[in-house]
Image (cartoon, rainbow, N blue to C red):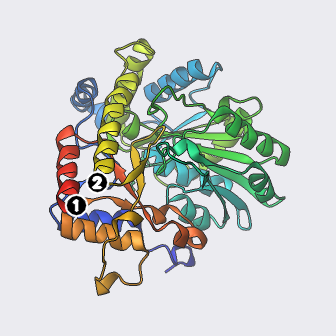
Amino acid sequence: HARRVEGFDKNIWVEFTQLISDYKVVNLGQGFPDFGPPSFMQEAYCNAICGGASMHQYTRAFGYPRLVKIIAKFFGRIMGREIDPMEEVLITVGAYHALFCTFQALVDEGDEVIIVEPFFDCYEPMVMMAGGTPVYIPLKPKEVTGSALSSADWLLCPEEVASKFNPRTKAIVINTPNNPLGKVFQRDELQMIADLCIKHDVLCISDEVYEWLTYDGEHHIKIASLPGMWERTVTIGSAGKSFCATGWKVGWAMCSGHILKHLKTFHQNSVYHCPTAPQEAVAVGFQREYDVFGTEESYFRQLPAQLHAKRLKLAKSLRSVGLQPILPQGGYFMTTDISSLKVELNDPDTKDEPYDYRFVKWLIKEKGLAAIPVSGFYSPEHRADFQNYIRFCFVKEDSTLEAAEDILRQWN
Ligand code: PMP
Ligand code: GLN
């Protein structure tokens, strides 16, 4: 085997998805809806596959023309700038592939890439497979007393962030709203990062797959819209997350043409292009959203409203059994400290694993409830400090959330 695959054979999603499929569980694990996309998207998909021969054949390498055009128009309006659909938008196999193209195209041997912790796990192996070295900067919880915990309490220390930048730094990766905490980065936090990127001539890779999902008046801000940042930011999005169609695996990277051209080189020499029919369907979805943007009819408004209620429902269930959830400002995950549960874990097969891994395995096998251990979102150096948190996904039918609540209540 090649050296570049060494050490990356374990994967939290492969491991837990397999385990979950072996047991009968209420699944609040991996982040995907247990309901379908909205009917206008389902129709668009059906129309696409019945839409004639061209829908079943190759399309343009870097993105189906109708899709790149509407994405450029849609985000161009939001960002108040002209985006060139052919030069500044790249369609990828989900946000995963956008991330992979980005790291492969921009990170070299010896480059350092700063990653905000906790982070969506794949950033670490992807940086390393490109030959880069991840450098971690932790979000730390500030002391809070009494009031409910919120992802807003998790902050970066500006001096510590600044200390991570050096002449080897190639890029910083941020994820807002963040997976797993649900933190939505505020303008001053983004500005602090932007100032450092500009000062040190560093790229920003901004994973915004949960961009529509913000709650309680929070507002998603694109770091690429801050002065001087378009030229150095790769913004990554996902139709899977935007339209509740994770199985379609349509994602994109958007950035200035002088950067995107390198992502294209990697793309044309790897997948060449992505499936045609789902791109047509996503194009129809974005056109609809463009037309109704900001109105009650917009799915990008309806989905967070729906999820807001689910988020409160899950928080209530967790509180009812004495857990203290960290209320997310965005995204569709909720984390909670489990140390108060004092569960005796004595499965000898898992005795060398972090506590949260062992706890979730016990939860799946013994209680029929699936979650994801949060230490998997930390670097090896910091994993041990965060083995008392688990993550629940709430983009689920109310009946699923209620079944989870029943399980939680019964074991108390
Ligand atoms: N980034 C984050 C933060 C995610 O949670 C996910 C999981 N879906 C992805 C990227 C990958 O998205 P996609 O399913 O579009 O590949
Ligand atoms: N982003 C989703 C999650 O965090 C799915 C991850 C995956 O499928 N690998 O649960």
Pointer 2: what residue?
A: 321
Can I make out residue 181 in this image? yes
- Is 176 in front, or is 375? 375
Considering the numbered disc 1 on the image, is that residue within a helix, a strand or a loop? loop
Of 9 and 347, the residue lying toward us: 347
Dots 2 and 1: beta carbons under 8 Å?
yes
Q: Amino acid at mark 1?
A: Asn
Q: Which residue is mark 1?
A: 412
* N-terminal label among 2 and 1: 2
> For the residue carrying disc 1, how many other residues have a C-alpha within 10 Å: few (<14), some (14-19), or many (20+)?
few
> Residue 372 at what x, y percent from top left?
36, 60
Q: Which residue is pictured at 40% across the width and 34% down the height?
A: 242
Q: Secondary structure at mark 2?
A: loop
* Amino acid type of the residue tagged 2 in the rendering: Val
Horizontal side of residue 161 vs 302, given as left or right: right
- Pinpoint residue 379: horizontal percent, then vertical percent: 57, 67
The percent position of residue 316, horizontal first and vertical second, equals: 31, 43
